[in-house]
Image (cartoon, coloured by chain):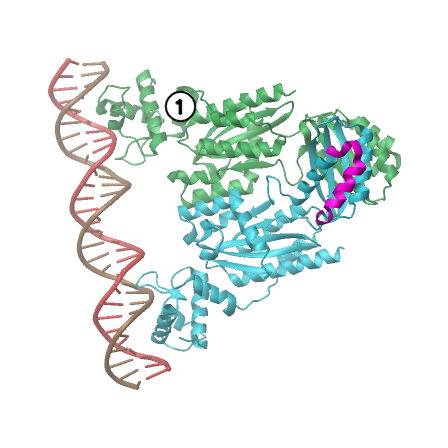
Chain colours: A green, B cyan, C brown, D red
Amino acid sequence: MYLDSRKMKILKAIIRTYLETGEPVGSRTISRYGELNVSSATIRNEMADLEEMGLIIQPHTSAGRIPTDQGYRLYVDELMDEKVREMSSLQHFFNTKMDHVESMLKDMARLLARDTNYAAMISAPRYLENEIRLIQLSRLDAYHIVTVVVMEGNVVRNHVITVESPVTEADILRLNILLNSALDGKTLDEISLSLIRSLKEQAGDNREVVMSILEAISESITNSREEKPEIYTSGATNIFKYPELSDNTNASGIISAFEEKDQLISLVNESKDKDHEIQVYIGKEAPIRSMQDCSIVTANYELGKGMRGTIGIIGPKRMDYEHVVSTLKTLMSELDRIYHDEE
Amino acid sequence: MYLDSRKMKILKAIIRTYLETGEPVGSRTISRYGELNVSSATIRNEMADLEEMGLIIQPHTSAGRIPTDQGYRLYVDELMDEKVREMSSLQHFFNTKMDHVESMLKDMARLLARDTNYAAMISAPRYLENEIRLIQLSRLDAYHIVTVVVMEGNVVRNHVITVESPVTEADILRLNILLNSALDGKTLDEISLSLIRSLKEQAGDNREVVMSILEAISESITNSREEKPEIYTSGATNIFKYPELSDNTNASGIISAFEEKDQLISLVNESKDKDHEIQVYIGKEAPIRSMQDCSIVTANYELGKGMRGTIGIIGPKRMDYEHVVSTLKTLMSELDRIYHDEE
DNA sequence: TGTTAGCACTCAATGTGGTTGATTGCTAAC
DNA sequence: GTTAGCAATCAACCACATTGAGTGCTAACA
């Protein structure tokens, strides 16, 4: 069966209406929708076809139709027209200069949640490709050293490490010079095995210390110790605005995914390698079990070189895809603009 | 009317039963409760009295009784017998040495939530009375300095500060020595105006820099910039286990309080000055509006000198007060023990 | 051939009335 | 002061009827 232009219009009308109301849509509603000037009976015939094609479904015999996951998919891929909106709040947000990447991301999550009325999450960037600007070791006492690593974008990480054999102030001084001259301007990716070997040799007696320090640095940078990539969330409670998600089982699962964050990490991992800048998961496509009744829109952002992270918007399947996608697109291009202006 | 020993027993029995079931408790249930050997009719008479005294209430005419906030209050204050339990999981937890205060607190929140089946929150300590062990300034470029402050307990804070007039490496070296010799071993409380004045004088040309640095240090320590005291939460979704809290309005309000955290801060502020180590808020006593159907138990902890924070357990009014209070008490004494052994 | 009006049919949602069972308050007897 | 007994209350439950939105089908129409 061919999906002709009228069928498309009808499908579009059904989905649009359903996005607003969340109630099954009947043939009469569509026949009065404006764009089509046909009777409800005609609509019914077309609807039967659309149902056979698996794009819409009846929750029960005498109800209207609601879109299937497939229907949404078609809508997102083909039917949706993107209107790029004025995002006054976001615009304003970017005019206020920000210093800390972390707190900016938090604010961004909050803003997205408020703007969309869905739940938002942002993963902190991984710094694999960021250049090291400064390494500073300080001796706390014979067995404890504080390492501070500053990377491009003024991202600071610190660590207290405990060493087996005592270190002196002189050792620290030597190590500071050694590490800085060797690692300054390098990215984590560039710290190769041969570099590590040569560092070890130069360190002499402090071989063991160098290793723990390198490890700490690597941990600091990858952000990968027990805390995994940090994830900021906001607006999880927005899901209560959508009755189809706010029954106990659903809500509890979704909220708890937001609380534990482990599952969100799997979402980030799933999305971050996608070619497409924007990725839409509908219903069962979602990589998180508790979100099988949701849709998720993700976008990969990049702040300057190598600082890449993922943004996700989680809402009901009848999500306002246009708005979300265009908001994310605008946001991405704003971020690009800002981080290129600043260089 | 006098609350004689039998009335007390009956009230206790009603509350105990209600804590378990969450259903209104009838007279027959109590008459078969064991401890009392009287008929249901007698219980009914006593119940009528207890109701008149405002300790219990009937949700509707032909239902059993449930405790009022006042009833719970009496129970918590007088009737409850604390059994100090084996807390195997907590015990085990403390045997594993921990390095970072922050991640320990996170774990503790998770543990408490799991152990109690309620929601848990912990506020990060304020470090007002903690001694500074090390201050390390590093020059990023002419206008940017990284400050790292290490305090007792290996708490590390850092800040990137921007200065108006350029600084040289030599300036930094001088300032490092100056600040460390002046501030080492001091607490934030001890950094007096006269100390600041003398530092400024010694700094000479770098007066302005010293001020920004001191400010940054103070901010680092008090934890008081825009992020307020950090709060760690866990188990917010546990509230879905209690039907009386899991209807939409309630759940949404409570979860959102946990998400936004602002309101939790007001709870911390409210609790932290109380004389009593353990504080119980019942129903409307709670300082958070959205938690008027909950009970909250808070405890003030102290890790070594001056690092004080607040723990809170949030659950339904029919909370297992005994368990929660005794868990918190044990936890407090464990923390005491550990942080005194370590000194 | 595609479109439409009309009609019988379906079924969730809502309402109604009766039944059940837990529980109470009261009273009279112990 | 305690208890047994009893009528009264009322949420919860179930069965059943009603309603109304919506469908599919058919026959008539353009």
The magenta region covers B188-208
Location of the C terminus of chain A (image quadrant): top right
Whether A227 is drawn above or below B245: the answer is above
* Residue B206 forms part of the magenta stretch: yes
Residue depicted at x 59% and y 34%? A103
Location of the N terminus of chain A (image quadrant): top left
On screen, residue A108 versus residue A157, left or right, reads: left
Percent of width and height locating residue A206: 86, 37
* Residue B281 forms part of the magenta stretch: no
How many residues crowd mark 1 within 10 Å: few (<14), some (14–19), many (20+)?
A: many
Percent of width and height locating residue A319: 41, 30
Whether C23 is drawn above or below B225: the answer is below
Q: Give the main secondary structure of the magenta stretch.
A: helix
On screen, residue A222 versus residue C29, left or right, reads: right
On screen, residue A5 versus residue B205, left or right, reads: left
- Splitting the image into 4 quarters, where does residue B219 fall? top right
Percent of width and height locating residue B217: 70, 40
Residue depicted at x 46% and y 59%? B318
Q: Chain of mark 1?
A: A
User: As rendered, which of B274 and B29 lies closer to the eye?
Assistant: B274
Percent of width and height locating residue B335: 67, 57
Residue depicted at x 28% and y 22%? A46
Could you tell me how many numbered marks the image carries? 1
Q: Secondary structure at mark 1?
A: helix
Residue A301 seen from this side:
yes
User: As rendered, which of B297 and D11 lies closer to the eye?
Assistant: B297
Amino acid identity at mark 1: Tyr
Residue depicted at x 80% and y 34%? B204
Task: Please name the residue that numbered disc 1 is placed on.
Answer: A75
- Splitting the image into 4 quarters, where does residue B218 fall? top right
